[in-house]
Amino acid sequence: MKHKLTLLVLALLLFTPSLVLAQTDTPAIEQMTIEIWPDFDQPAVLVLITGFFAEGTPNPTEVTLPLPNGADIHVVAVFTEDDVLTDQGVEYTTGDNTVTFSAPGTGFRLEYYVPYETLGNQRSFNYTWLADMPVNELTLMVQEPFAATGLTTNPTAVNVTENNGLTYHSLPPQPVPAGTPLSVDVTYTMSSPQLTVDSQVPEDTTVTNPEPIPPSSASSTSFLDNINWPLVLAGAGLLLIIAAVVWQIASSRSNKKRPVKPKPQAASRAAAKYCHECGQPLQAGDKFCRECGTAVKK
């Protein structure tokens, strides 16, 4: 009995690691979004799959995703531990309608193109998700082409929203177990062959760039445009008035009659002197009479 019990324990120990490996070989996806953009930048269907791993998923982990018939891979990228999306150094291999790659971070991104069916202006296609990995929450949405009319989905979208001038048809988020398909059929009419990307005009190209202006001309024009001319004219007028008043005051002061100085009176002539002897007039400085020779009295 003890021998049989020992063999049973050994068998369980040998079987348990293989069971654990089988469970961890296939990663679980916590959240996945599948965006379907028909007639976006090519006359085909662009599929964008973004997934994030469930907690406890080994790092790195090997991911195998399904590919529809005729799929043309555009990019395979991964999210780093810092949630930065990059395709640098990502290598992948394709198999029988599958693509396999190693994801060292928190998630991944797969983009590819698939053809649609054309009947006149009518477009139709089917998309099916079927993978060996479980998805806890999968959201599928269809972007209506810019030039499309009458777009319908089967199953019917439960949420139709507008964003950036485009319409999005979304199916409800739902869990998808491993090996369980999720399908959607899309039909619409193209009123013109215009692709959606051609309708998305960048903001910086909507403005016509003016001819470059030389710095000096530009600065002078800007200065003149910013002048408040009514205020400048009012200020100039006020200065003229002040100048006129000052000039008037200065002129009136200069024209006032200045006090007239009294004219200098002529010095009174010295009293005439005569010779006391003969009565002859004497000149200044005479000491003797020029007529009689008598000494002049002082």
Image (spheres, rainbow, N blue to C red):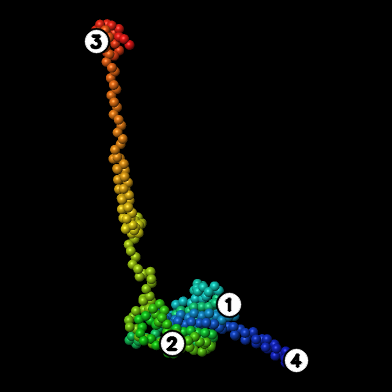
Which mark's residue is nearer the viewer, 2 or 3?
A: 3
Q: Position of residue 216 (x, y in %)?
A: 35, 55
Which mark's residue is nearer the viewer, 1 or 4?
A: 1
* Residue located at (33% from left, 64% from top): 210
Judging by the rendered image, the residue that carries numbered circle 4 is 2
Residue type at numbered disc 3: Gln
Mark 2 or 4, nearer chain start:
4
Which mark's residue is nearer the viewer, 1 or 3?
A: 3
Mark 3 or 4, nearer chain start:
4
In whole angstroms, how far apart are the C-alphas of marks 1 and 4? 42 Å
Mark 2 or 1, nearer chain start:
1
- Closer to us: 200 or 14: 200
Mark 2 or 3, nearer chain start:
2
Residue type at numbered disc 4: Lys
Which mark's residue is nearer the viewer, 3 or 4?
A: 3
Query: Tag 3: Cα neighbours inside 10 Å, few (<14), some, or many (≥20)?
Result: some
Q: Are marks 3 and 4 in contact (CB under 8 Å)?
A: no
The mark found on residue 157 in the picture is 2
The mark found on residue 59 in the picture is 1
Query: Tag 1: Cα neighbours inside 10 Å, few (<14), some, or many (≥20)?
Result: few
Judging by the rendered image, the residue that carries numbered circle 3 is 280
* SS at circle 1: loop
